[in-house]
Amino acid sequence: ETGVTQTPRHLVMGMTNKKSLKCEQHLGHNAMYWYKQSAKKPLELMFVYNFKEQTENNSVPSRFSPECPNSSHLFLHLHTLQPEDSALYLCASSQETDPNYEQYFGPGTRLTVT
Amino acid sequence: AQTVTQSQPEMSVQEAETVTLSCTYDTSESDYYLFWYKQPPSRQMILVIRQEAYKQQNATENRFSVNFQKAAKSFSLKISDSQLGDAAMYFCAYFGGSQGNLIFGKGTKLSVKP
């Protein structure tokens, strides 16, 4: 396991539910990311936070709401999701957003929307 | 827009043999980074190797090496002396200076036969 943890590892939710994904990094990094990994599709960047400030929102629907209360924690709040939102959601962190700094990934949350 | 293409959805290699995974990309930038990531069945993505576009020398990390052909926009990964633990999804990724975030290919699933 790297220093990036994600909870829960699996989540099943109905379309009317509200749930949150949590990511925590113990690496002292300043940048954190949310990615969506769907079957047969490339990994898609959703959000980037750098020093707790959101620097990237990759045209993500508003039913996904990120929150970064501090540099160590990142949340993804979910509400009124669609079945096509079922995917593996990966969190990552890096020292900075510069590509010279490696991104460390968490194990992911497998989300199923019913 | 930049794109990353991995034309081999699946590959197979005999243990101790050598295998090459292909990746091509499209960009108009001259300064960028290229990466290979490995995602084992446990799902935690890890960085295998990185190449800076301005460096002519191909990157090497133990049994992993790349063949970077900038003019052809090709970035293949060679795994020598394949081991059972090399079995995983391998993702090629691009990071461009102006774009500022990782763009991933769809991945290649590598199987290693004992």
Image (cartoon, coloured by chain):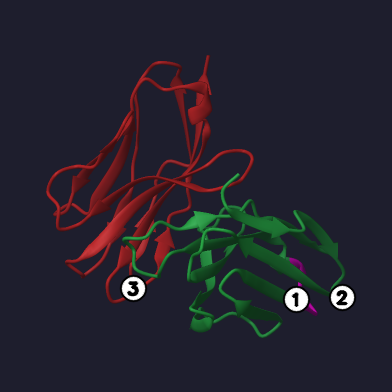
Chain colours: A green, B red
Q: Quadrant of residue B30?
A: bottom left
Q: Is residue B33 above or below residue A48?
A: above
| The one of A82 and B38 positioned closer to us in this rendering | B38
Circles 1 and 2, Cβ within 8 Å, touching? The answer is yes
| Label 2 chain ID | A
**Earlier along the polypeptide chain: callout 1 or callout 2?**
2
Q: Is residue B28 above or below residue A88?
A: below
- Magenta span: A78-83
Locate the N terminus of chain A and report the quarter of the image it occupies: top right
Q: Is residue A9 magenta?
A: no
Disc 3 marks a residue whose amino acid type is Ala
| The one of A74 and A12 positioned closer to us in this rendering | A74
SS of the residue at dot 2?
loop
Disc 1 marks a residue whose amino acid type is Leu
Q: Who's the residue at 63% across and 71% down the image?
A: A74
SS of the residue at dot 3?
loop
Q: Who's the residue at 75% across and 54% down the image?
A: A9
SS of the residue at dot 1?
strand
Q: Position of residue A51 (x, y in %)?
A: 48, 79
CA separation in Å, label 3 and label 2: 36 Å
Q: Which mark is residue A78?
A: 1
Q: Position of residue B104 (x, y in %)?
A: 43, 58
Disc 2 marks a residue whose amino acid type is Asn
Q: Nearer the viewer, mark 3 or mark 1?
A: 1
In the rendered view, does A114 fall on the left or right side of A28? Answer: right
In the rendered view, does B53 fall on the left or right side of A55? Answer: left
Residue to which mark 3 is pinned: B1
| Label 1 chain ID | A
CA separation in Å, label 1 and label 2: 8 Å
